[in-house]
């Protein structure tokens, strides 16, 4: 798989960009602040419908513009597919597949399968659980596009249920008598509990299944990055009180367990005004030897396990059929020579690698990569970036 064409309109710093790309290794070279990362971010957005840099779409739209457009032509086994995404802040995205509108932008997921390496990857080890949950969910979505709908449904239910919990305390018992408003609120909570359990169980099962697939690949990739070091491992930690032998990929079992926990913790949830049970409270625990990586891994070890997570994702997607596009955003500058060589060896086997670098010396000299300079120019709207192809 490779991207043959990338077009941007009012995306981040780019008023307009039209790039012709090819298989092999391409390096976008230019000083920081020239918009190199924005090119890679646009491709990642086409792959996952999300940014790895910001949580909302508004910053993706160039200042002064009302919308942004990302267009790609992807070639997979000789077949070309064209995807056009229109991003409007605060509204649902619009998408076209082969120039024909689709009902939901999620229908384009799976057209471009990509794996991204970026300096932000250190947060996978040192950051909050949300970073690791997003890693799992993004990979699950690329691997199985239907997971995107499960995520969207769960997030919607979670927002509605949390809003109800925040108002529930005012509708509780007054002077020892349950009010009509309280009864209605609790009945409504029962309905939202059922929805949250159904969607949450599907999402948790998908995550656990993915972790089971990732575990051996992460262990192998970590040894590649840090030979002779402690072994790396990972485990899914659920907010449910489950035993190790419980069937964590059984959706029906998880749904029943979620309903039980939601009932048991309802009083606490109402008191605190938040949902305390569900996959939004889970974590991916990373281990080095018998210690958790977070808090115990050195800087080099943290980088190695973060890279191992990305390499494992690459191998999983490759095993599903066809190389994903490999996106390397200024990552070589963050690595020592040993880790550079290990990453370069893996990247050399990919069908297409798109790299950003401040200087060409950051990229392995023996790659035979095509260098694409990024420059700034002045026009009537101010200084903007341009690609010198």
Image (tube, rainbow, N blue to C red):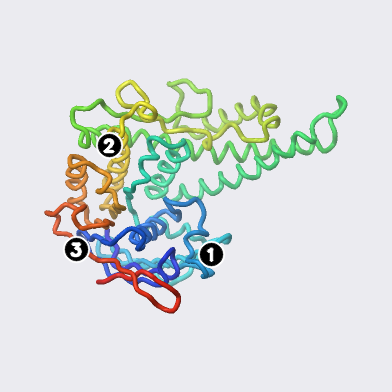
Q: Residues within 10 Å of mark 3 (few under 14, many from 20)?
A: some
Q: Nearer the viewer, residue 373 or 312?
A: 373
Q: Nearer the viewer, mark 1 or mark 3?
A: 3
Inspect this view and state whether residue 355 appears. no
Considering only vertical position in the picture, is 321 above or below 62?
A: above
- Counting from the top left corner in percent of width and height, residue 381 is at 45, 75
**Left or right: where 109 falls relative to 302:** right
Secondary element type, mark 1: loop
On the image, which quarter does residue 287 sit in? top left
- Counting from the top left corner in percent of width and height, residue 289 is at 30, 23
On the image, which quarter does residue 286 sit in? top left
**Left or right: where 345 falls relative to 41:** left
Q: Answer whether labels 1 and 3 touch (C-beta < 8 Å).
A: no
Q: Nearer the viewer, residue 184 or 281?
A: 281
Secondary element type, mark 3: strand
Inspect this view and state whether residue 4 appears. yes
Q: Nearer the viewer, residue 221 or 292?
A: 292
Residue annotated with mark 1:
88
Q: How crowded is mark 2: few (under 14 residues within 10 Å), some or many (20 or more)?
A: many
- Counting from the top left corner in percent of width and height, residue 164 is at 70, 41
Tell me the distance, in whole angstroms, between the alpha carbons under discs 3 and 2: 27 Å
- Counting from the top left corner in percent of width and height, residue 170 is at 79, 35
Tell me the distance, in whole angstroms, between the alpha carbons under discs 2 and 1: 37 Å
Q: Which disc, if any, is residue 370?
A: 3
Residue annotated with mark 2:
304
């Amino acid at each position: 798989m490779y991207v043959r064409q990338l077009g941007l309109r009012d995306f981040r710093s780019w008023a307009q960009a039209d790039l012709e790309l090819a298989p092999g290794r391409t390096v976008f070279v230019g000083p920081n602040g020239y918009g190199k990362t924005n090119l890679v971010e646009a491709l990642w957005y086409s792959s996952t419908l999300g940014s790895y840099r910001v949580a909302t779409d508004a910053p993706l739209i160039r200042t002064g513009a009302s919308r942004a457009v990302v267009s790609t032509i992807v070639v997979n086994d000789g077949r070309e597919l064209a995807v056009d995404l229109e991003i409007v802040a605060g509204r649902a995205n619009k998408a076209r597949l082969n120039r024909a509108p689709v009902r939901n932008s999620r229908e384009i997921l799976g057209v471009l399968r990509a794996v991204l390496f970026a300096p932000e990857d250190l947060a996978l080890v040192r950051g909050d659980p949300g970073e690791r949950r997003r890693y799992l969910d993004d990979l699950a979505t690329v691997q199985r596009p239907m997971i995107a709908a499960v995520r969207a449904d769960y997030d919607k239910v979670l927002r509605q249920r949390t809003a109800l919990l925040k108002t529930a305390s005012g509708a509780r018992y007054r002077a020892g008598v349950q009010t009509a408003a309280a009864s209605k609120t609790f009945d409504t909570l029962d309905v939202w509990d059922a929805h949250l359990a159904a969607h949450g169980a599907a999402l948790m099962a998908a995550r656990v299944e993915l972790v089971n697939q990732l575990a051996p690949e992460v262990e192998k990739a970590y040894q590649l990055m840090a030979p002779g070091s402690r072994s790396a491992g990972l485990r899914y930690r659920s907010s449910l009180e489950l035993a190790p032998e419980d069937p964590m990929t059984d959706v029906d079992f998880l749904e029943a367990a979620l309903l039980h926990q939601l009932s048991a913790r309802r009083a606490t949830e109402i008191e605190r005004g938040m949902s305390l049970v569900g996959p939004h409270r889970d974590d991916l625990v990373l281990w080095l030897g018998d210690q958790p990586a977070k808090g115990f891994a050195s800087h080099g070890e943290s980088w190695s396990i973060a890279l191992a997570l990305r390499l494992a994702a690459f191998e999983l997607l490759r095993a599903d059929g066809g190389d994903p596009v490999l996106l390397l955003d200024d990552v070589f500058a963050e690595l020592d020579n040993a880790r550079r060589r290990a990453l370069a060896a893996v990247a050399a086997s990919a069908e297409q690698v798109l790299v950003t670098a401040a200087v060409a010396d950051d990229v392995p000299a023996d790659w035979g990569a095509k260098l694409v300079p990024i420059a700034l120019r002045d026009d009537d709207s101010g200084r903007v970036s341009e690609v010198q192809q």
